[in-house]
Image (cartoon, helix red, strand yellow):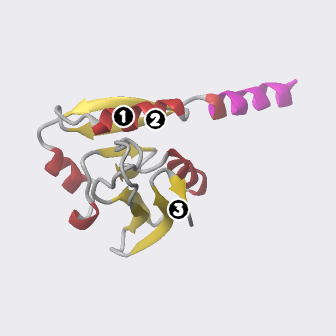
Amino acid sequence: MKKIVLSSLVLVGLLQAQMIEVYKSPSCGCCSNWEKNMNQNGFETKEIKTDEIISIKSKYKVPLELSSCHTAVVDGYVVEGHVPADEIKSLLAKKPKDVLGISVPGMPLESLGMEQGSVPETYDVVAFKEDGSREVVATYIGSKKIK
């Protein structure tokens, strides 16, 4: 009986949506599109509109050259910009201790939330670490992962 109860509790925990806090400018529409995709991929989002987005990026130690339009936080990790849901899920599954977060720098055309029907750009998902180092964890063309 104890095994059944314990198994049920574990299953409930796995089924609960992970909460992502999304800090964004009040006027940014692409961020809302990214949030909708996060919701479709099993995440809950809490939108926090702020005119102090630069301060938020500084607080969470987002390197300037990796910055984008919005900064999100999930389970203690920073998610900067239009990061695909699969990369967030991978980060949360691996839980690397030395990683502060992952980023899609800038606003690449046809990345998640930036769909405009144009030619997709190639972009990297970059992990940034406490020691200042960085590592490309994935490469995409539009919404398609190529490595």
Bin the neighbour count of mark 2 within 10 Å (Cα to Cα): few under 14, some 14-19, many 20 and up.
Answer: some
With 123 as the anchor, is 30 left or right in this view? left
Viewer-proximal residue among 145 and 84: 145
Q: Which mark is residue 37?
A: 2
User: Given contact means CB atoms under 8 Å apart, are the residues at marks 1 and 2 in contact?
Assistant: yes
Gap between marks 1 and 3, in whole Å?
28 Å
Name the residue type under label 2: Asn
Please name the predominant secondary structure of the magenta segment in the image: helix
Question: Residue at position x 41%, y 65% from top?
Answer: 126
Q: Which mark is residue 96?
A: 3
Viewer-proximal residue among 29 and 81: 29
Question: Residue at position x 59%, y 57% from top?
Answer: 94
* SS for callout 1: helix
Name the residue type under label 1: Asn
Bin the neighbour count of mark 3 within 10 Å (Cα to Cα): few under 14, some 14-19, many 20 and up.
Answer: few
Q: Which mark is residue 33?
A: 1
Gap between marks 1 and 2, in whole Å?
6 Å
Q: What is the span of residues highlighted in magenta in the rendered image? A: 1-13
Question: Residue at position x 41%, y 58% from top?
Answer: 102
- Tell me where residue 64 appears, x and y as whole percent: 21, 64
